[in-house]
């Protein structure tokens, strides 16, 4: 009787603990669901460590194509920071595909409009959005490694045969039969086979352990694909079909996955059932056999796996942009759907602003050719160049522009702005700069129906004045005409006269008030007439002798055209 009471009490404790675990899991799911609703319309709250940015470009690196944003332009436009502002994704698939999308402004107008329809659907149907986000949470993240790092790890294992394990397991049959003929011999044979399998199991298990993570993610990928297709999102019929086709092609790869992923660590412990299953694995190599089968099937269907990652990542990217648009609405910031043309030479934007500035000054521009910006230091020239570039890039990747109106052709986008010396190769700033500019000139020569839209800040600042103006003039002339449109900023006021027939002049100006210099960051037509470099020296407290001599020397040069040491 005491034994019955004891085991009954133990059973109740086990049931209680299991029930507590189930309740805790449900509470956590409810909390996460509530967070998804509450975070809509707010800015993303994520931490980014260095290794995360090593992982995020993984999908992009494996899907390179002509016309993507190169590293120079990406860095010039601070696109890592822009990506962080846009990124509301939960899974590695969504995060990596969103990064790829921002680097790929090559899609057609029809594809961009399709993406916009998906984004709009998620904005208008919060319950479907949350249901999908919960699925992507179950798919999860891959940590510090890219999805494609894991897939490449699988390739390193090569083809693994089950022949040895199969032969050893078949030997159990005659060993069991020997039990009925000569019991001691039969028992000895079974013990020998088990000892051999257990000893070899540990070494093989350690070898494949790192790769089980890859297979586990693929298993979650298939489950998420099936559950996402079951949502039957009406505007995503194409994606629904792709998910079902991929799941069907890979179903065979998941046979026996229970043995591989259940208690993946392979160590004893846990419940009595876990312990029993561990010994079955070690004695018969069941999980190793199914691992090899899964590995072989996955190797055959890598394209389908890539398609599933792409499709789920695409849908989660749409959710991310839906949440980004909602955050702009919450903050009272305008955004618009762009009017994109396959050809043309006019870029027009009204009240355009930069996505990383909290209280941005908005500017409008309409340009059918080159634009040359002048103005004093810190007046806003570089920021305006980046604003226009980001307007074009977001229009061609996310089908949205941070403006009240945006109308332009589809471009190939390049910049040469925030350059620096390359210490590793020993190249000076000037060498780095002329290489950067040449890649834009080379892009213009490529046979493409899309014109080049380029942005150049302080062209050839790395060399002397005379050669800079001469070379800069000819380079900027080469960046005009059919097939290319250039926005450039310069301190060389001479360029505004030399290029007046090819570039339209705009400028930013400042105001000196109460011993301080103030900028309004408002774009104005015409070239700049003010200079503030020497005045800034005065404001910063430089000796008046330096200020007066510098002013006198500058005035002499403007009058006589030659420099005289005062």
Image (cartoon, rainbow, N blue to C red):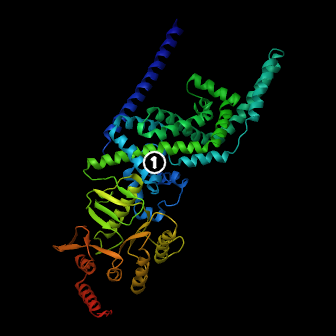
- The image quadrant where one finds the C terminus is bottom left
Determine the image quadrant of residue 299: top right
Residue 88 visible here: no
List x then y, in percent, for residue 560.
Answer: 29, 94
Q: In this picture, is 255 found above or below 242?
A: above
Determine the image quadrant of residue 23: top left
Residue 427 visible here: yes
Instruction: State the residue position of label 1.
Output: 95
List x then y, in percent, for residue 118.
Answer: 40, 43
Task: Write the residue at 41% across / 40% down.
Answer: 235
Q: In this picture, is 317 found above or below 471?
A: above
In the rendered image, the residue lying farthest to the top is: 1
List x then y, in percent, for residue 22.
Answer: 44, 25
Q: In this picture, is 144 found above or below 7?
A: below
Task: Write the residue at 76% across / 35% down.
Answer: 163
Task: Write the residue at 44% across / 71% down.
Answer: 420
Q: Residues within 10 Å of mark 1 (few under 14, many from 20)?
A: many
- The answer to whether 82 appears left or right of 1 in the picture is left
Q: How many marks?
A: 1
Task: Write the residue at 35% across / 45% down.
Answer: 323
């Amino acid at each position: 009787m005491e034994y019955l009471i004891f085991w009954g009490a133990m059973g109740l404790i086990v049931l209680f603990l299991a029930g507590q675990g189930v309740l805790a899991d449900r509470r956590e799911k409810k909390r996460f669901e509530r967070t998804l609703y509450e975070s809509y319309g707010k800015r993303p709250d994520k931490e980014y460590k260095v290794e995360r940015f090593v992982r995020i470009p993984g999908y992009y690196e494996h899907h390179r194509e002509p016309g993507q944003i190169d590293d120079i332009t990406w860095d010039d436009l601070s696109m890592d920071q822009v990506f962080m502002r846009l990124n509301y994704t939960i899974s590695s698939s969504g995060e990596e595909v969103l990064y790829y999308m921002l680097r790929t402004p090559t899609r057609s107008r029809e594809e961009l409009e399709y993406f916009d329809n998906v984004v709009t659907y998620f904005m208008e149907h919060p319950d479907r959005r949350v249901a999908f986000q919960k699925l992507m949470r179950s798919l999860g993240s891959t940590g510090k490694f890219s999805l494609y790092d894991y897939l490449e790890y699988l390739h390193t294992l090569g083809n693994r045969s089950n022949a040895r394990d199969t032969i050893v397991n078949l030997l159990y049959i005659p060993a069991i039969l020997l039990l009925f003929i000569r019991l001691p011999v039969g028992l000895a044979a079974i013990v020998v086979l088990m000892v051999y399998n257990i000893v070899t199991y540990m070494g093989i298990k350690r070898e494949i352990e790192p790769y089980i993570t890859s297979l586990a993610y693929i298993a979650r990928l298939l489950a998420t694909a099936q559950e996402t297709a079951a949502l039957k999102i009406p505007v995503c019929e194409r994606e629904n079909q792709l998910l079902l086709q991929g799941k069907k092609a890979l179903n065979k790869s998941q046979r026996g996955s229970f043995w591989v992923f259940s208690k993946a660590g392979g160590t004893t412990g846990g419940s009595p059932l876990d312990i029993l299953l561990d010994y079955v694995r070690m004695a018969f190599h069941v999980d190793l056999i199914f691992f090899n089968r899964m590995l072989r099937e996955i190797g055959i269907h890598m394209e389908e796996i890539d398609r599933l990652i792409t499709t789920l990542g695409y849908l989660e990217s749409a959710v991310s942009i839906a949440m980004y648009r909602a955050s702009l609405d919450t903050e009272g910031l305008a955004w618009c759907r762009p009017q994109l043309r396959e050809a043309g030479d006019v870029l027009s934007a009204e009240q355009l602003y930069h996505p990383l500035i909290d209280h941005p000054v908005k500017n409008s521009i309409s340009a059918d050719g080159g634009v040359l910006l002048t103005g004093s230091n810190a007046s806003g020239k570089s920021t305006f160049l980046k604003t226009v570039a980001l307007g074009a890039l977001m229009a061609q990747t996310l089908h949205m522009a941070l403006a009240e109106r945006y109308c332009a052709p589809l471009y190939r986008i390049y910049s040469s702005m925030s350059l620096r010396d390359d210490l590793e190769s020993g190249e000076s700033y000037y060498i780095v700069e002329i290489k950067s500019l040449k890649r834009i000139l080379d892009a213009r020569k490529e046979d493409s129906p899309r014109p080049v839209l380029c942005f150049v800040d302080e062209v050839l600042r790395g060399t002397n004045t005379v050669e800079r103006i001469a070379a800069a003039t000819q380079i900027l002339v080469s960046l005009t005409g059919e097939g290319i449109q250039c926005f450039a900023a310069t301190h060389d006021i001479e360029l505004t006269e030399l290029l007046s027939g090819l570039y339209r002049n705009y400028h930013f100006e400042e105001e000196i008030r109460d011993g301080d210099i103030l900028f309004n960051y408002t774009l104005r037509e015409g070239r700049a007439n003010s200079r503030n470099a020497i005045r800034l020296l005065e404001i910063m407290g430089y000796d008046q002798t330096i200020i007066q001599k510098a002013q006198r020397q500058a005035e002499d040069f403007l009058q006589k055209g030659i420099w005289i040491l005062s």
